[in-house]
Each structure stands twice: as structure tokens, then as C-alpha cells.
Image (cartoon, rainbow, N blue to C red):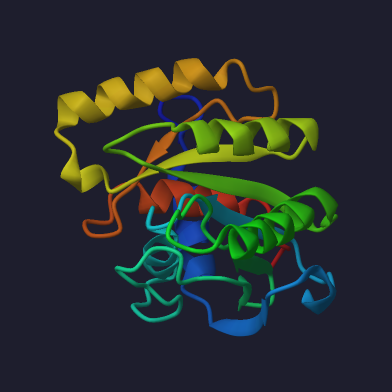
Amino acid sequence: MNDPANPDAPSQAELEAARILFAQECGFVAASATIPQLPPETLPEVAFVGRSNVGKSSLVNALTGRKTLARTSNTPGRTQEVIFFDLGGRLMLVDLPGYGYAKVSKAKQAIWTDTLFAYLRGRPTLQRVSMLIDGRHGLKELDVEAMDMLDRAALSYQVVLTKADKVKPAELAAMIDKTSAALKRHPAAHPTVVATSSETGDGIPALRAELARFANPS
């Protein structure tokens, strides 16, 4: 049964089905630095994008219940490729390179950005983008630019706040409200903001349920 106070909240059945899906074998498929290296389009894809060091790899690991599936690093800008993981033969998880890291050359940053945006614009199997935003800091200029691009591509995306455990509850609630208000100006944005913590697991079941809707049937 859904929560009457929050009709968009997943039901217990949806949460359980998503838990089972994300407990399936999840294997590395490919790491592509350029568009010609992308693997064939087979499964529905959900991608994770955000500024460098926003916690993309940690979130992918938390969703799948693994500690080392996606590489994590305290050094922003280290993930330079589009990385594909096959989840149970039903869904492809795509860890995208972080954008906005200033300590790499502008030429290299441009290559990453071109590859990232070319993938987002031109991948017909891509069903949903999870746009990760640091819950402590909220939307930045580069995030809004990325959202504008996704709007132009008419590509569905949902804002996922990360590191929610590092924000006081009242401040997190205010950040969710502020972010939700900003999303009203973006036609391709999903209206519901999900706050997550890879450390405590908060919000992870709800995000699993949201993403599981795009998976092939079991």
C-alpha cells in the first residue's frame, strides 16, 4: 500500500521487488572514454551524473550493496570514462564522469564533457538520469547548465541529494524544498527529490524502487 501522505512513495511491494533486483549479480561491462567505444545498446540504462566528488561511485555501491563495484576516490576527477554495469541482465547502471573539476587541463575537461553530453543526448536506451547534488551545498551553476542540456534533450532526470547524513534534518528539509522549487523551471526534471546517504543507507530503498521501474521484467 502506498503512503496516502506521499502518493509518489513506492509501495512495500515495489520496495521489495527493487531490493531483489539490486541484489542480483552486477558485473562490469565496459569503460568507454569516447563515444565510438560505447558498448552496444542492449538493456534499458539508468545513468548517474554530477559534479566531481559528489559521491556517484559510493551511491552505485550502496544501491547494489557492494563496497567495491564502482571505484571511489577522495581525488575528484579520477573517473574519466563512462562505466557500464549489467544488473541481473535486466538493467544497465551507467557511472558517468564527473564534471566541473578545475584541476585538470581545459582540453581534457572538454573531452570528458563532450563525451558525457554526447552520451546523454544520443543514447536511445537511456531511460533516466539520476543527477547527484551534494546535499550540503545544493545546485551550482554547472548543475543548472547540465539540467538545461537535459531539458533540451527532453531526457528525464531526477535530482538525488547525496551525503544527507552530513546535514542536519531541518537544513536537509529546507534544501529539499529549495531544490524542488528550482526544478519547477525545468520541464524534463522529475518533481520528486530523493535525499540519500551512502553511509547510513537513508533514501537508498526509495531510489532503488524508482530506478527498478525501468528494468526489463524478470
**Residue 8 vertical placement versus 116 (above, below):** above
Q: Position of residue 189 (x, y in %)?
A: 62, 30
Front-lying residue, 83 or 100 = 100
Residue beneath the point at 66% across and 57% down = 110
Front-lying residue, 31 or 52 = 52
**Residue 25 vertical placement versus 44 (above, below):** below
Residue 147 picture quarter: top right
Residue 5 picture quarter: top left
User: How many numbered tags mark residues here?
Assistant: 0
Q: Is residue 35 left or right of residue 72?
A: right
Residue located farthest toward the left when viewing the structure as drawn: 168
- Which quarter of the image is occupied by the N terminus? top left
Q: Is residue 13 left or right of residue 205?
A: right
Q: Is any part of residue 86 visible from this angle?
A: yes
Q: Position of residue 39 (x, y in %)?
A: 79, 77
Q: Position of residue 117 (x, y in %)?
A: 72, 51
Front-lying residue, 41 or 10 = 41
Q: Is any part of residue 126 visible from this angle?
A: no
Q: Position of residue 63 (x, y in %)?
A: 43, 63
Residue beneath the point at 78% across and 55% down = 118
Residue beneath the point at 64% across and 62% down = 107
Front-lying residue, 36 or 218 = 36
